[in-house]
Image: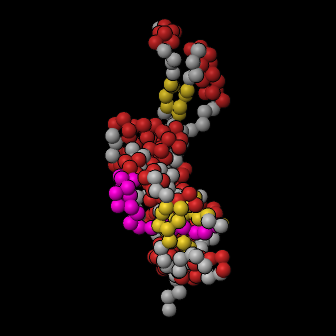
Amino acid sequence: MNTKKPALGRGLSALLENANTDITSSRSADSINLPAAGAIASILIHQVEANPFQPRTHFEKEALVDLTNSIKEHGIIQPITVRKIGYDKYQIISGERRFKASQIAGLKEIPVYVRIANDQTMLEMAIVENMQRQDLNPIEISLSYQRLIDECNLTQEKLSERIGKSRSAVTNFLRLLNLPSAVQAGLRDAKITMGHAKALLSFKTEGEILAAYKDILENKLSVRGIEEKTKTAKSVSSRTLSTSTLSLSEKKVQEDLSFHFNSKIKIAKSNNGKGKIVIPFDDEEHLKRILDLLD
Protein backbone atom coordinates (compact mmCIF):
# COMPACT_ATOMS: atom_id res chain seq x y z
CA MET A 1 0.00 0.00 0.00
CA ASN A 2 1.39 3.37 -1.01
CA THR A 3 1.23 5.72 1.98
CA LYS A 4 3.37 8.47 0.46
CA LYS A 5 1.86 11.88 1.06
CA PRO A 6 0.78 13.49 -2.24
CA ALA A 7 2.69 16.56 -3.38
CA LEU A 8 1.08 19.83 -2.37
CA GLY A 9 0.79 20.92 -6.00
CA ARG A 10 -1.37 17.91 -6.88
CA GLY A 11 -3.53 18.37 -3.78
CA LEU A 12 -4.04 22.12 -4.04
CA SER A 13 -7.31 21.99 -5.99
CA ALA A 14 -8.74 19.44 -3.56
CA LEU A 15 -7.83 21.69 -0.64
CA LEU A 16 -9.51 24.71 -2.23
CA GLU A 17 -12.65 22.76 -3.13
CA ASN A 18 -13.05 21.11 0.27
CA ALA A 19 -16.00 22.64 2.14
CA ASN A 20 -14.26 21.92 5.46
CA THR A 21 -11.63 24.53 4.61
CA ASP A 22 -14.21 27.19 3.75
CA ILE A 23 -14.94 29.75 6.43
CA THR A 24 -18.52 29.94 5.14
CA SER A 25 -19.12 26.31 6.16
CA SER A 26 -19.59 27.52 9.75
CA ARG A 27 -23.03 29.16 9.73
CA SER A 28 -22.84 31.20 12.92
CA ALA A 29 -25.09 34.16 13.62
CA ASP A 30 -22.49 36.68 12.54
CA SER A 31 -21.84 34.81 9.27
CA ILE A 32 -25.46 34.43 8.15
CA ASN A 33 -24.91 36.84 5.25
CA LEU A 34 -21.77 35.12 4.01
CA PRO A 35 -21.97 32.93 0.87
CA ALA A 36 -22.34 29.16 1.17
CA ALA A 37 -19.31 26.91 0.94
CA GLY A 38 -17.86 26.84 -2.57
CA ALA A 39 -19.90 29.85 -3.72
CA ILE A 40 -18.41 33.01 -5.20
CA ALA A 41 -18.74 36.19 -3.13
CA SER A 42 -18.37 39.76 -4.30
CA ILE A 43 -16.61 41.97 -1.74
CA LEU A 44 -15.33 45.53 -1.66
CA ILE A 45 -11.80 45.69 -3.02
CA HIS A 46 -10.58 47.88 -0.14
CA GLN A 47 -11.41 45.02 2.24
CA VAL A 48 -8.72 42.88 0.59
CA GLU A 49 -5.03 43.06 1.46
CA ALA A 50 -1.99 41.58 -0.27
CA ASN A 51 -0.53 38.20 0.62
CA PRO A 52 2.55 38.68 2.85
CA PHE A 53 3.74 35.24 1.71
CA GLN A 54 3.58 36.11 -2.00
CA PRO A 55 6.67 34.55 -3.60
CA ARG A 56 6.50 36.75 -6.68
CA THR A 57 8.67 39.86 -6.33
CA HIS A 58 8.45 41.09 -9.91
CA PHE A 59 5.32 41.67 -12.00
CA GLU A 60 5.94 42.29 -15.70
CA LYS A 61 4.56 45.75 -16.42
CA GLU A 62 3.35 45.05 -19.95
CA ALA A 63 1.51 41.88 -18.93
CA LEU A 64 -0.09 43.74 -16.01
CA VAL A 65 -1.28 46.48 -18.37
CA ASP A 66 -2.79 43.87 -20.72
CA LEU A 67 -4.59 42.19 -17.83
CA THR A 68 -5.87 45.56 -16.58
CA ASN A 69 -7.32 46.37 -20.02
CA SER A 70 -8.94 42.93 -20.19
CA ILE A 71 -10.53 43.40 -16.76
CA LYS A 72 -11.86 46.83 -17.76
CA GLU A 73 -13.56 45.28 -20.79
CA HIS A 74 -14.63 41.85 -19.53
CA GLY A 75 -14.33 41.98 -15.73
CA ILE A 76 -12.58 39.27 -13.68
CA ILE A 77 -13.23 35.84 -15.23
CA GLN A 78 -11.46 33.83 -12.50
CA PRO A 79 -12.18 34.92 -8.89
CA ILE A 80 -9.22 35.36 -6.54
CA THR A 81 -8.93 33.14 -3.45
CA VAL A 82 -8.80 34.83 -0.03
CA ARG A 83 -8.96 34.02 3.65
CA LYS A 84 -10.95 36.00 6.21
CA ILE A 85 -8.65 37.57 8.83
CA GLY A 86 -11.12 39.81 10.67
CA TYR A 87 -14.41 41.63 10.43
CA ASP A 88 -14.72 42.65 6.76
CA LYS A 89 -11.00 42.01 6.22
CA TYR A 90 -9.60 39.47 3.78
CA GLN A 91 -6.11 38.42 2.72
CA ILE A 92 -5.15 37.04 -0.69
CA ILE A 93 -4.16 33.38 -0.93
CA SER A 94 -3.82 33.34 -4.71
CA GLY A 95 -4.57 35.81 -7.49
CA GLU A 96 -2.23 38.67 -6.56
CA ARG A 97 -1.77 39.77 -10.19
CA ARG A 98 -5.52 39.84 -10.83
CA PHE A 99 -5.94 41.86 -7.63
CA LYS A 100 -3.31 44.43 -8.66
CA ALA A 101 -4.82 44.76 -12.13
CA SER A 102 -8.30 45.21 -10.60
CA GLN A 103 -6.99 48.04 -8.44
CA ILE A 104 -5.45 49.74 -11.48
CA ALA A 105 -8.68 49.20 -13.41
CA GLY A 106 -10.53 51.07 -10.64
CA LEU A 107 -12.89 48.26 -9.62
CA LYS A 108 -14.85 48.82 -6.43
CA GLU A 109 -15.74 45.17 -5.89
CA ILE A 110 -13.99 41.90 -6.73
CA PRO A 111 -15.24 38.27 -6.93
CA VAL A 112 -13.59 35.91 -4.44
CA TYR A 113 -13.57 32.43 -2.95
CA VAL A 114 -13.25 32.62 0.85
CA ARG A 115 -11.20 29.93 2.54
CA ILE A 116 -9.60 29.24 5.93
CA ALA A 117 -5.81 28.84 5.89
CA ASN A 118 -3.11 29.16 8.54
CA ASP A 119 0.16 30.92 7.80
CA GLN A 120 2.02 27.78 6.74
CA THR A 121 -0.77 26.73 4.42
CA MET A 122 -0.93 30.29 3.05
CA LEU A 123 2.76 30.23 2.20
CA GLU A 124 2.60 26.79 0.62
CA MET A 125 -0.53 27.54 -1.36
CA ALA A 126 0.79 30.85 -2.67
CA ILE A 127 4.08 29.29 -3.79
CA VAL A 128 2.53 26.26 -5.44
CA GLU A 129 -0.22 28.28 -7.12
CA ASN A 130 2.43 30.50 -8.68
CA MET A 131 4.74 27.63 -9.65
CA GLN A 132 1.85 25.87 -11.38
CA ARG A 133 1.61 28.89 -13.68
CA GLN A 134 5.28 28.26 -14.59
CA ASP A 135 6.16 31.94 -14.87
CA LEU A 136 8.13 32.54 -11.69
CA ASN A 137 11.76 33.39 -12.45
CA PRO A 138 14.47 31.07 -10.98
CA ILE A 139 15.38 33.48 -8.17
CA GLU A 140 11.75 33.80 -7.06
CA ILE A 141 11.52 30.00 -6.99
CA SER A 142 14.77 29.75 -5.02
CA LEU A 143 13.60 32.31 -2.46
CA SER A 144 10.26 30.51 -2.19
CA TYR A 145 11.98 27.18 -1.50
CA GLN A 146 14.17 28.83 1.13
CA ARG A 147 11.14 30.38 2.83
CA LEU A 148 9.39 27.02 2.97
CA ILE A 149 12.50 25.51 4.57
CA ASP A 150 12.99 28.35 7.06
CA GLU A 151 9.39 29.16 7.99
CA CYS A 152 7.81 25.72 7.76
CA ASN A 153 10.78 23.82 9.25
CA LEU A 154 11.16 21.54 6.25
CA THR A 155 14.27 19.65 5.20
CA GLN A 156 15.25 19.67 1.52
CA GLU A 157 14.00 16.10 1.28
CA LYS A 158 10.62 16.95 2.83
CA LEU A 159 10.35 20.04 0.64
CA SER A 160 10.95 17.97 -2.50
CA GLU A 161 8.12 15.65 -1.45
CA ARG A 162 5.75 18.55 -0.74
CA ILE A 163 6.22 20.25 -4.10
CA GLY A 164 6.64 17.10 -6.20
CA LYS A 165 10.20 17.91 -7.34
CA SER A 166 13.37 15.84 -7.12
CA ARG A 167 15.83 16.50 -4.29
CA SER A 168 18.52 17.50 -6.82
CA ALA A 169 16.19 20.03 -8.47
CA VAL A 170 15.48 21.65 -5.10
CA THR A 171 19.22 21.74 -4.27
CA ASN A 172 20.08 23.33 -7.63
CA PHE A 173 17.59 26.13 -7.08
CA LEU A 174 18.74 26.77 -3.51
CA ARG A 175 22.39 27.01 -4.66
CA LEU A 176 21.45 30.00 -6.83
CA LEU A 177 21.13 32.05 -3.64
CA ASN A 178 24.92 31.65 -3.17
CA LEU A 179 25.56 33.73 -6.30
CA PRO A 180 26.50 37.43 -5.93
CA SER A 181 23.48 39.76 -5.93
CA ALA A 182 24.41 41.21 -9.35
CA VAL A 183 24.33 37.73 -10.91
CA GLN A 184 21.03 36.91 -9.16
CA ALA A 185 19.55 40.10 -10.63
CA GLY A 186 20.81 39.10 -14.08
CA LEU A 187 19.15 35.69 -13.77
CA ARG A 188 15.94 37.28 -12.51
CA ASP A 189 15.88 39.67 -15.48
CA ALA A 190 16.67 36.87 -17.98
CA LYS A 191 20.06 38.33 -18.93
CA ILE A 192 21.51 34.87 -18.33
CA THR A 193 19.97 31.40 -18.27
CA MET A 194 19.71 28.81 -15.52
CA GLY A 195 22.47 26.90 -17.32
CA HIS A 196 24.78 29.92 -17.15
CA ALA A 197 24.03 30.32 -13.43
CA LYS A 198 24.82 26.68 -12.65
CA ALA A 199 28.12 26.98 -14.57
CA LEU A 200 29.04 30.16 -12.66
CA LEU A 201 28.61 28.31 -9.37
CA SER A 202 31.65 26.22 -10.34
CA PHE A 203 34.00 29.17 -9.88
CA LYS A 204 35.76 29.39 -6.52
CA THR A 205 35.56 33.09 -5.59
CA GLU A 206 33.04 35.90 -5.94
CA GLY A 207 35.56 37.84 -8.03
CA GLU A 208 35.86 34.97 -10.51
CA ILE A 209 32.08 34.62 -10.72
CA LEU A 210 31.57 38.34 -11.38
CA ALA A 211 34.34 38.41 -13.99
CA ALA A 212 32.81 35.42 -15.79
CA TYR A 213 29.33 36.98 -15.55
CA LYS A 214 30.63 40.17 -17.17
CA ASP A 215 32.23 38.05 -19.88
CA ILE A 216 28.88 36.36 -20.59
CA LEU A 217 27.12 39.70 -21.01
CA GLU A 218 29.82 41.40 -23.07
CA ASN A 219 30.73 38.47 -25.34
CA LYS A 220 27.41 36.62 -25.37
CA LEU A 221 29.05 33.44 -24.13
CA SER A 222 27.06 30.22 -24.36
CA VAL A 223 26.74 27.83 -21.42
CA ARG A 224 29.37 25.65 -23.11
CA GLY A 225 31.67 28.67 -23.36
CA ILE A 226 31.45 29.48 -19.67
CA GLU A 227 31.95 25.80 -18.78
CA GLU A 228 35.22 25.87 -20.75
CA LYS A 229 36.31 28.90 -18.73
CA THR A 230 35.51 27.00 -15.56
CA LYS A 231 37.72 24.10 -16.67
CA THR A 232 40.55 26.54 -17.44
CA ALA A 233 40.23 28.18 -14.02
CA LYS A 234 40.32 24.78 -12.30
CA SER A 235 43.39 23.80 -14.32
CA VAL A 236 45.22 26.98 -13.27
CA SER A 237 44.16 26.42 -9.67
CA SER A 238 45.47 22.84 -9.82
CA ARG A 239 48.83 23.97 -11.15
CA THR A 240 49.04 26.61 -8.43
CA LEU A 241 48.43 24.03 -5.73
CA SER A 242 51.22 21.84 -7.12
CA THR A 243 53.88 24.54 -6.68
CA SER A 244 56.39 23.97 -3.92
CA THR A 245 56.96 26.26 -0.95
CA LEU A 246 59.87 28.69 -1.26
CA SER A 247 62.86 28.12 0.96
CA LEU A 248 64.07 30.83 3.38
CA SER A 249 66.84 31.85 0.98
CA GLU A 250 64.40 32.04 -1.95
CA LYS A 251 62.02 34.19 0.10
CA LYS A 252 64.96 36.47 0.92
CA VAL A 253 65.75 36.80 -2.80
CA GLN A 254 62.09 37.63 -3.45
CA GLU A 255 62.17 40.39 -0.81
CA ASP A 256 65.46 41.82 -2.11
CA LEU A 257 64.18 41.93 -5.69
CA SER A 258 60.95 43.60 -4.56
CA PHE A 259 62.97 46.31 -2.80
CA HIS A 260 65.32 46.75 -5.75
CA PHE A 261 62.59 47.15 -8.37
CA ASN A 262 60.13 48.90 -6.04
CA SER A 263 57.53 46.32 -7.05
CA LYS A 264 56.00 43.25 -5.38
CA ILE A 265 58.09 40.53 -7.06
CA LYS A 266 56.66 37.02 -7.07
CA ILE A 267 58.82 33.91 -7.37
CA ALA A 268 56.84 30.79 -8.29
CA LYS A 269 58.52 27.38 -8.22
CA SER A 270 57.06 23.99 -9.11
CA ASN A 271 57.90 20.68 -7.47
CA ASN A 272 60.29 19.75 -10.30
CA GLY A 273 62.49 22.77 -9.54
CA LYS A 274 61.40 24.90 -12.48
CA GLY A 275 59.86 28.30 -11.88
CA LYS A 276 59.43 31.91 -12.90
CA ILE A 277 59.87 35.43 -11.57
CA VAL A 278 56.93 37.81 -12.04
CA ILE A 279 57.60 41.57 -11.95
CA PRO A 280 54.34 43.56 -11.93
CA PHE A 281 54.22 47.26 -12.85
CA ASP A 282 51.65 50.00 -12.29
CA ASP A 283 51.99 52.05 -15.48
CA GLU A 284 54.29 52.76 -18.43
CA GLU A 285 56.57 54.98 -16.38
CA HIS A 286 56.98 52.29 -13.74
CA LEU A 287 57.75 49.75 -16.48
CA LYS A 288 60.43 52.05 -17.92
CA ARG A 289 62.12 52.33 -14.51
CA ILE A 290 62.17 48.54 -14.18
CA LEU A 291 63.65 48.15 -17.67
CA ASP A 292 66.34 50.73 -16.88
CA LEU A 293 67.31 48.71 -13.79
CA LEU A 294 67.52 45.54 -15.86
CA ASP A 295 70.02 47.11 -18.36
The answer to whether residue 173 is visible is no
Q: Position of residue 254 (x, y in %)?
A: 60, 23
> Which quadrant of the view contains residue 220?
top left
Which of 181/238 is in front? 181
The residue that appears at 62% across and 82% down in the rendered structure is 27
Q: Position of residue 124 (x, y in %)?
A: 55, 68
The residue that appears at 51% across and 17% down in the rendered structure is 282
Tell me if 51 is positioned left or right of 66 in this view.
right
- Residue 10 higher or lower than 79, as above or below: below
The answer to whether residue 222 is visible is yes
Residue 79 part of the magenta segment: yes
Task: Specify the segment rendered in magenta.
Answer: 66-85
Instruction: Tell how many labels.
Output: 0
The residue that appears at 51% across and 18% down in the rendered structure is 281
- Residue 133 higher or lower than 262, as above or below: below
Q: Position of residue 196 (x, y in %)?
A: 40, 49
Residue 113 part of the magenta segment: no
Q: Position of residue 44 (x, y in %)?
A: 53, 62
